[in-house]
Image: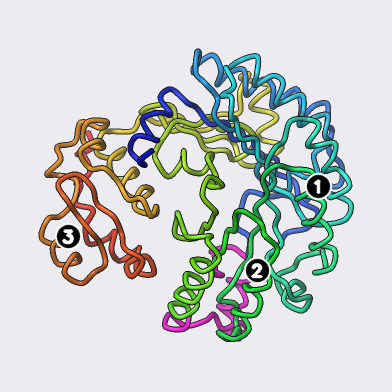
Amino acid sequence: MSAVADLRAQGDRLALYIHWPFCVSKCPYCDFNSHVRDGIDIDRWLAALLADMAHEAALLPGRKLGSIFFGGGTPSLMPPHLVQALIDQAGKYWRFADDIEITLEANPSSVEAARFADLAQAGVNRVSLGLQALDDDVLAFLGRAHSVAEALAALDTAQRQFGRVSFDLIYARPGQSLEHWETELSRALAFGTGHLSLYQLTIEPGTRFETLVRRGELQPADDDHCADLFDLTRQLTDAASLSAYEISNHARAGEQSRHNLTYWRYGDYAGIGPGAHGRRGNMATERHRKPENYLAAVARNGHGLSVERALTPNTQATEALLMGLRLAEGLDLADLAVRTGVPLGALVDDAATQRLVKLGLITRNDRRITVTPAGMPLLDAVLAEIVAIEPEPTT
């Protein structure tokens, strides 16, 4: 089935994202909505998340649920009975696809790995492990609490308990050579895992690492070295039949993250929990970020919404381009024009497109535009060149 046919076959499929905002500690590179708390009232959180889910279900009736994703924070800290209650309730609101993907992000600690069997019993069928590195010194630098040995034991447990497993690694770290990354990634590929998320270290605003860079105490890898590391990553993963289907995500055939494909293909998804984003047709949603504010909003309003914003056709088209061109499959421009009502000729800058085609950074036919492997390391610059949509005037 082609990518376009596969997308259309999804039909009325919906994705559900559930955010668990709590972590044991805050990593110095992390800008996600995560919080450290001494005590968590599980019953109160279950009631709040169920109420928030009910609100979204009432606005999205009759849909088929293709995926559920427990993100965070550290969802593997959730008691399995809480996970099961949320999955069970989702099944009462929406029809589950026969091949529904239910993913939970997990830290690879021995404490959390001990819950994997119960989480699988609760309905989780895919786990995403935050290994981040295969070097104990690097793990300490990244602020991770687990060791390499502990992480590999957790990976082994995960691959026995779940049908599908993914893990993350962070590369382009300060001082990391091509040789070191080749050794580390080759070792990771030998584990036989069907999906890898391989991210270059980025210095995000508001993080501890950003403070260290500002003080001159941390020197990020330079752009040329990052490009060389990116090329090496593609070579090694291609050779292992884990080709990149998205700029940072690699999978064997059939092991792509269906949930994340919903985002990148600009499908609908309900987002509940603190800080969760969602999209219902032409409506973007955001929840209150701080856990206490979220709980107060649910108690007050029956949901945790802080923002509910109508998306104009031009905004939808722009967002769909920015997301879809991250994918190796590219984007069907004619389909996007029909979906958003923005004329086909107004979606991309033809002159810029022709110039980048000649440079080998993109391909383009009458319908489809795709960023090439050579263009992916320059994706931000490519998008700035070709996305031609003008914002609607504000009133």
Location of mark 2 (residue): 208
Q: Residues within 10 Å of mark 1 (few under 14, many from 20)?
A: few
Dividing the picture into quadrants, the one containing residue 288 is top right
Residue sitting nearer the eye, 187 or 204? 187
Asked if the residues shown at circle 3 and circle 1 are in contact, with their CB atoms under 8 angstroms apart, the answer is: no
Residue 192, percent from left and from top: 67, 60
Residue 137, percent from left and from top: 77, 79
First-in-chain label (2 vs 1): 1
Look at the numbered disc 1 and give the secondary structure of its residue.
Answer: loop
Q: Provide the residue span drawn in magenta.
A: 200-225
Residue name at image x 16 percent, y 69 percent = 358
Residue 386, percent from left and from top: 21, 57
Give yes or no for residue 222 being in the magenta stretch. yes
Mark pair 3, 2: CA separation: 39 Å
Amino acid carrying label 3: it is: Thr
Amino acid carrying label 1: it is: Arg
Say whether residue 235 is left or right of residue 182. Answer: left
- Badge number at residue 37: 1
Location of mark 3 (residue): 353
Mark pair 3, 1: CA separation: 49 Å
